[in-house]
């Protein structure tokens, strides 16, 4: 099965054994150790994407975690924005770290992230320019966001909210799956992860026509 398949299987086996957030498909790993989830607030287990269950977040929802410490470099998030064509308030998708080392955060009254995210960002297998392109139009009805940056050490993070705010900055929509790595992935592995997530969540039609896994999944 190779490196990619082994990593995914290892993460899913660990989550099953610990019975932690399997509905969300959350994979947060640091050297084979799960990062501890400290707080869950106002998250509903009511979303559906490609006939699979997801978590539904609202303006006051959040999932907050701590680590001791956690090395972050790359993430993949399957999500949808379900509240119109702009972010009304700052809508946190995945944030954390000193001075927002991770900042996937909707900008106030815009259809873009608040500031260009640190590092590079791809959406549905395409390179994304946050200065000129809407993020919302790419993830309505579901999409795959990938961020890659230089390594950073985190002492805390939040999914579905802004990490240093307690209310009114939540993600209004679904979050289906989160995969976080403490190393950057090769182009080959990145394509495999995108293909795995796209076919799992019914988003393969959003991949580029020349994507390696447009018409087939990398994992059977």
Image (spheres, rainbow, N blue to C red):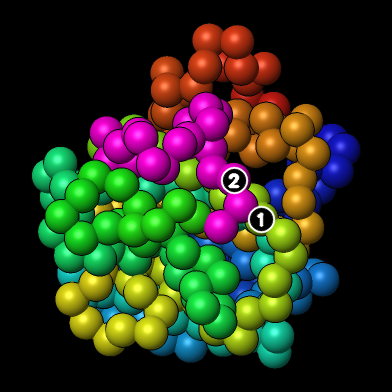
As measured in the structure, the alpha-carbon distance from the residue carrying label 2 to the one carrying label 1 is: 6 Å
Q: Which residues are magenta?
A: 118-137
The answer to if 59 sits in the magenta stretch is no
Which quarter of the rendered picture does the C terminus lie within?
A: top right
Residue 153: which quarter of the image? bottom right
Residue under the point 15% across and 55% down: 109
Residue 59 shown left or right of residue 35 in the figure: left
| Residue 8 image point, x, y percent | 71, 49
Query: What is the secondary structure assignment of the residue under circle 1?
Result: strand
Residue 36: which quarter of the image? bottom right
Q: Nearer the viewer, residue 65 or 87?
A: 87
Q: How many marks?
A: 2
Q: In the orientation shown, which residue stands out farthest toward the right?
A: 2
Residue 27 shown left or right of residue 103 in the figure: right
| Residue 81 image point, x, y percent | 25, 47
Taken as a whole, is the magenta stretch helix, strand or loop?
Answer: loop
Which quarter of the rendered picture does the N terminus lie within?
A: top right
Q: Nearer the viewer, residue 24 or 101?
A: 101
66 vs 103: above or below: below
- Mark 1 Cα within 10 Å, few/some/many (few <14, many 20+)? some
Badge 2 is on which residue? Answer: 120
Residue under the point 17% across and 47% down: 86
- Asked whether residue 46 is in view, the answer is no
The answer to if 131 sits in the magenta stretch is yes
Badge 1 is on which residue? Answer: 149
Determine whether label 2 and label 1 are within 8 Å by CB.
yes
């Amino acid at each position: 099965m190779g490196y990619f398949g082994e990593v995914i299987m290892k993460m899913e086996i660990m989550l099953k054994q610990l019975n932690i957030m399997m509905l969300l498909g959350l994979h947060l790993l640091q050297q084979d150790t799960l990062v501890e989830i400290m707080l869950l607030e106002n998250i509903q287990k009511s979303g559906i994407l490609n006939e699979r269950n997801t978590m539904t977040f609202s303006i006051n929802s959040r999932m907050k975690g701590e680590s001791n410490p956690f090395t972050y470099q790359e993430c993949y998030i399957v999500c949808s924005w379900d509240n119109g064509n702009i972010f009304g308030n700052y809508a946190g998708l995945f944030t954390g770290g000193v001075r927002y080392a991770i900042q996937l955060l909707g900008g106030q009254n815009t259809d873009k992230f608040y500031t260009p995210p640190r590092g590079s960002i791809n959406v549905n297998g395409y390179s994304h320019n946050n200065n000129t392109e809407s993020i919302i139009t790419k993830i309505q009805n579901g999409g795959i966001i990938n961020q890659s940056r230089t390594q950073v050490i985190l002492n805390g993070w939040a999914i579905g909210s802004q990490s240093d705010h307690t209310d009114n900055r939540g993600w209004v929509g679904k979050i289906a799956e989160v995969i976080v790595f403490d190393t950057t992935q090769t182009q080959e592995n990145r394509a495999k992860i995108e293909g795995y997530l796209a076919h799992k969540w019914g988003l393969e039609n959003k991949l580029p026509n020349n994507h390696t896994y447009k018409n087939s999944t990398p994992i059977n």
